[in-house]
Amino acid sequence: MKVNYDPESDIFYIIIKEESIKDTIEAGNNIFLKIAENESIAGIEAWNASKNTRTSRKRAFSKKIKKSLQLAQQKQR
């Protein structure tokens, strides 16, 4: 797994596995899931990350990510 932040675009990336991306699903408020060819989640993008990761909002941001992953897993079933 790799984690990266691009300050120019204000996007926080979590690359779960290096795979070819088949689709992107918007999972919630500025949270996008990258779907691999085998239908698994290959990565997560969080747009406007600086607005969501201030110290006072880290827990809420973490919950958004977890909820987005849960929703995506339900959609894949």
Image: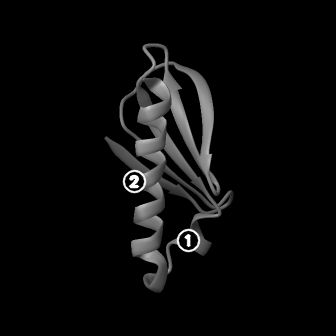
Kindly identify which numbered label has been placed on residue 66: 2
For the residues carrying marks 2 and 1, which lies nearer the camera in this image? 2
Taking the image as shown, residue 9 lies to the left or right of residue 70, namely right
**Element on which disc 2 rests:** helix
Image vertical order of residue 47 relative to residue 53, above or below: above
Please name whichever residue, 51 or 73, is drawn nearer the observer in this view of the structure: 73
Asked if marks 2 and 1 touch (Cβ < 8 Å), the reply is: no
Please name whichever residue, 11 or 35, is drawn nearer the observer in this view of the structure: 35
**Looking at the rendering, in which quadrant would you find the N terminus?**
top left
Q: CA gap, disc 2 to disc 1?
A: 14 Å
- Residue at far bottom of view: 56
Residue 63: percent from left, percent from top: 41, 63
**Looking at the rendering, in which quadrant would you find the C terminus?**
top left
Image vertical order of residue 52 relative to residue 69, above or below: below
Residue 57: percent from left, percent from top: 48, 79
Residue 64: percent from left, percent from top: 48, 60
Please name whichever residue, 18 or 38, is drawn nearer the observer in this view of the structure: 38
**Element on which disc 1 rests:** helix
Kindly identify which numbered label has been placed on residue 52: 1
Image vertical order of residue 67 relative to residue 42, above or below: below
Which residue sits at x=50%, y=80%?
54
Question: In the picture, residue 11 is in which quadrant?
Answer: bottom right
Q: Type of residue at label 2? A: Lys
